[in-house]
Amino acid sequence: MQSLVFTLSPGLELCKVIERMAPEGGVFTLCDSNTASLVYPLMTQDCPYLNNNTLIVTPAGDENKTLAHLSHIWEELQRLGATRHSLLINMGGGMVTDMGGFAAATFKRGMRCVNVPTTLLGAVDASIGGKTGINFGELKNEIGVFAEAESVIISPIYFNTLRKEEFLSGYAEMLKHGLLQSSESIHSLLAKDATRLDNQEMLELLRNNISVKQKIVEQDPTERGLRKALNLGHTFGHAFESWHLKSGSPVPHGYAVAWGLVCALILSHMHLKFDATLLRDVAKYVERNYGAPQLRCSHYNELVDLMRHDKKNVNATHIQFTLLKAPGKPETGHEAKEDDIKITLDLMRDLMHV
Ligand code: GLY
C-alpha cells in the first residue's frame, strides 16, 4: 500500500523516506523546468541525497507529457547509470508524477518511485493512486499503467507559488472528494475561503480529503468498479474541457470539473432525488469561484458528442455517469439519455445565470 506522508517539512521527510528505502542503485530526481528552479534547490538544502548530477529536467506543461519527453527521461536514466534498484523522485505537478511514474514503472521493467506533488491538483489527485502515463495521438493519458509510487510526500508549503486559478483547480477535486465523503465534509469545504487557509489548516484538510481517494483506491486499484466514483463530474467536465480547448480558449482542468460537478448533481437530482438545496449551494459556490461555461443551445450536440467519445465510456451509444443519491452515496455506471443531458445543460445555465 502507498504510504502518504503529510508534512510542513517535505525535505526532511523525503530524506527519512529515502533512508528507509535505502535504494542500492542511487537516487534520481525528475523535475519540470519550473520545479527545477523553484522547489528543487530548497529540497536539496534539507535532503543531501538529492544531487544535481542526477537531476533530470523535462519541460513544464501537460502538452509535453509525450513519448518524446518520456524517451528523454529513459535516455537520461540510462546515461546516468540508473538500475532497477534505483529510486526516482518525481517532484512537480500531475504532469511530472504521471510521466515520471510511467518512466519508473517501465525502466528496466520497473524501479521504485516517490512522488513529491507541488500543486494542489497533484497532491489531491494525480500523485495518489497509481495512474501513470502520457498523452498520445492527441488523446490524454492514452498510454500508461497502474503503478503506485511507494510513498507520496504531501505538503502545502509550495502552494503559495501557484496562481489563483491553479489553486482553485485543485480545490475542485477536493469538492468532489467532499461530495463523495459526507454532507458534513462538503458543507465544510463550501464554507471555506480556500485561498486564505494557513498551512496547518490546509495540511489537516488535505489529510482528511485525500483519505477519501485513498480508501477508494485501496478497494479498487484498477478501476473495475468502485473507483469509477472518482469520475464524479468528469463526464461533463472532460466535455467542457475539450470544448474549450477546441474553441481556442482552454480552461484549467479543475474549472471544467467544477462545472461538471454541478451538472452531475443536477442529473443526480433528476434521477436519484439528490437534495436540491445542496445542489443550489454547490452551484452558487462554483459560479462565485469558477464562473460558468458560456454555453448556448447550439453547442449541446457537440458536447454530447464529446461525452460519447470519452474513453471512460464503455461504448459510444450509452453515456455513463457517476451520480450521487446523497453525499457519500455514489452510484457508478448510470446511463442517461441524450434528452436528459440536454435538460441538465439547460438547468445548469439557469442555475448559473448563463
Ligand atoms: N483521477 C481519478 C482517479 O485517479 O481514479
Image (cartoon, rainbow, N blue to C red):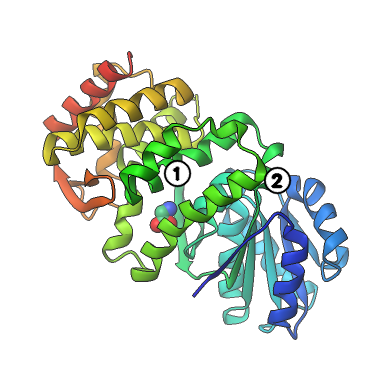
- Establish whether ligand 1 lies closer than 8 Å to the Cβ of label 1: yes
Query: Residue at left 45%, top 31%?
Result: 191
Q: Is there any visible trace of residue 37 in the rendered image?
A: yes
Query: Residue at left 71%, top 38%?
Result: 161
Left or right, 162 with respect to 122, comes to right
Query: Residue at left 33%, top 27%?
Result: 281
Query: Residue at left 79%, top 73%?
Result: 79
The answer to whether residue 164 is above or below residue 21 is above
Q: Position of residue 307 (x, y in %)?
A: 28, 40
Q: Position of residue 227 (x, y in %)?
A: 33, 60
Q: Is there any visible trace of residue 135 in the rendered image?
A: no
Q: Nearer the viewer, residue 254 or 326?
A: 326
In which quadrant of the rendered view does residue 74 lie? bottom right
Q: Nearer the viewer, residue 178 or 34?
A: 178
Q: Position of residue 343 (x, y in %)?
A: 16, 25
Q: Secondary structure at mark 2?
A: helix
| Residue for badge 1 | 173
| Residue for badge 2 | 158
- Which numbered disc flags the more N-terminal residue, 1 or 2? 2
Left or right, 102 with respect to 221, comes to right
* Residue at the extreme top of the image, as rendered: 353
Q: Nearer the viewer, residue 213 or 40?
A: 213
Report how many numbered discs are placed on residues in the image.
Answer: 2
Please tell me how crowded label 2 is: few (under 14), some (14-19), or many (20+) other residues with Cα within 10 Å: some
Q: Position of residue 300 (x, y in %)?
A: 25, 25
- The amino acid on which the numbered mark 1 sits, given as a three-letter code, is Glu
